[in-house]
């Protein structure tokens, strides 16, 4: 009888922990490893396979900004790819709805439509971003990256960097 009560207690605690974890990740925030070099030097990325995760930056993403789309120029965000919803990206928010943005290495100036934004990686040479797939619908944004939490020597708050020279507000 003692064996069954121990197993039942373990099961109850496991299910409770899973439900609490699910609630936190669904409503408040989550952690995500940064893969690829598109955000270098802001984030250090490594190989996407298991041992690489131990060397790559792991970041904290908060979801409170999603409540009323409270974003600012220069925020680092995570979002679903507009072309492949199974893929997630971490990029810097350059322009918001109504802004005019100059496309890098071009004389083209675009107005950001309502409900969309313009994102770019900090390492332009290695970044798949709005220059490739265009405007990103605000509904695809999953949250704002606030802190690097791994590795321990890189624990820090993520700096907001604005591309002021390339943006014209409304």
Image (cartoon, rainbow, N blue to C red):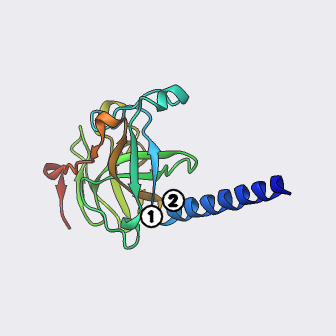
Residue 91 in picture, x, y percent from top left? 36, 46
Instruction: Please name the residue that numbered disc 1 is placed on.
Output: 28
Residue 144 in picture, x, y percent from top left? 36, 56
Along the line of sight, which residue is nearer the eye, 169 or 105? 169
Along the line of sight, which residue is nearer the eye, 58 or 166? 58
Looking at the image, the residue that sits furthest to the left is: 165
- Judged left or right of residue 149, residue 5 is right
- Judged left or right of residue 129, residue 155 is left
Mark 1 crowdedness (10 Å alpha carbons): few <14, some 14-19, many ≥20: some
Secondary structure beneath dot 1 equals loop
Tell me the residue at 35%/64% (across/down).
Answer: 113
Contact (CB < 8 A) between labels 2 and 1?
yes
Mark carried by residue 14: none
Looking at the image, the residue that sits furthest to the front is: 2
Distance from Cα at disc 2 to Cα at disc 1: 6 Å
- Judged left or right of residue 126, residue 33 is right
Mark 2 crowdedness (10 Å alpha carbons): few <14, some 14-19, many ≥20: some
Mark carried by residue 25: 2
- Judged left or right of residue 109, residue 58 is right
Asked if residue 49 can be seen in this view, the reply is no
Looking at the image, the residue that sits furthest to the bottom is: 68
Tell me the residue at 24%/62% (across/down).
Answer: 99
Quarter-of-image position of residue 64: bottom left
Tell me the residue at 56%/47% (across/down).
Answer: 84
Q: How many marks?
A: 2
Residue 122 in picture, x, y percent from top left? 28, 39
Looking at the image, the residue that sits furthest to the right is: 1
Q: Quadrant of the N terminus?
A: bottom right
Residue 134 in picture, x, y percent from top left? 40, 50
Along the line of sight, which residue is nearer the eye, 100 or 95? 95
Tell me the residue at 55%/59% (across/down).
Answer: 21
């Amino acid at each position: 009888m003692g064996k069954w009560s121990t197993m039942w207690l373990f099961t109850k605690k496991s299910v409770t922990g899973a439900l609490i974890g699910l609630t936190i990740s669904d409503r408040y925030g989550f952690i995500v490893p940064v893969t690829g070099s598109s955000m270098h030097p802001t984030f250090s990325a490594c190989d996407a396979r298991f041992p690489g995760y131990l060397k790559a930056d792991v970041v904290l993403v908060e979801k409170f900004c999603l409540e009323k789309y409270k974003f600012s120029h220069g925020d680092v965000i995570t979002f679903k790819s507009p072309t492949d919803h199974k893929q997630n990206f971490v990029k810097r928010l350059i322009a918001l709805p109504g802004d005019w943005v100059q496309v890098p290495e071009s004389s083209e100036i675009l107005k950001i439509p309502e409900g969309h934004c313009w994102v770019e990686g900090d390492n332009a040479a290695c970044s798949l971003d709005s220059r490739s797939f265009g405007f990103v619908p605000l509904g695809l944004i999953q949250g704002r990256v606030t802190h690097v939490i791994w590795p321990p020597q890189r624990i820090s708050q993520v700096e907001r960097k604005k591309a002021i020279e390339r943006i014209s507000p409304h």
